[in-house]
Amino acid sequence: MAGMFIDVKVDAAAARQPELVKKLVEVCPVGIFAQAEGGALRIVEENLDECVLCELCIAAAPQGTVRVVKLYEE
Ligand code: SF4
């Protein structure tokens, strides 16, 4: 699932790391990341289009594990 304008893709292994997920939840100013029970990542679909492209999530994660995709440029 994606927003209309933005999709956020997180590497499957990274999405299961509770510490990394916690960091993503903290850095995103518009609440796109949430932590599900058990610690895994849950993307908050209804917030995807609020993304301000700040790239804080990309900076917080190991290189290449988080990608913010602009659907309107594809
Ligand atoms: S780029 Fe910024 S607003 Fe968009 S998902 Fe990442 S942290 Fe959230």
Image (cartoon, grey):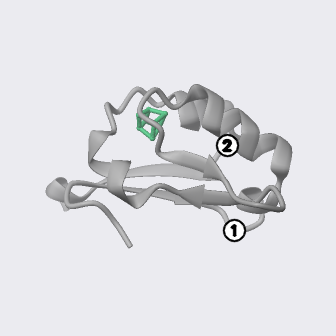
**40 over 55 or under it: above or below:** below
Q: Residue at x 77, y 43 (%)?
A: 20
**24 over 9 or under it: above or below:** above
Image quadrant for the N terminus? bottom left
Query: Percent position (x, y) of residue 13?
Result: 77, 65
Residue type highlighted by circle 1 = Ala
The quarter of the picture where residue 16 lies is bottom right
Q: Which element carries disc 1, helix, strand or loop?
A: loop
Residue type highlighted by circle 2 = Gln
Q: Nearer the viewer, residue 43 or 54?
A: 43
4 vs 59, left or right, is left
**Label disc, if present, on residue 12 of the rendered structure:** 1
**Residue on which the image places disc 2:** 63
Q: Which element carries disc 2, helix, strand or loop?
A: loop
Q: Which residue appears farthest toward the left when viewing the image?
A: 72
Q: Earlier in the sequence, mark 1 or mark 2?
A: 1
**Label disc, if present, on residue 21 of the rendered structure:** none
- The local crowd at label 2, few if under 14, some if 14 to 19, many if 20 or more residues have their Cα within 10 Å, is few
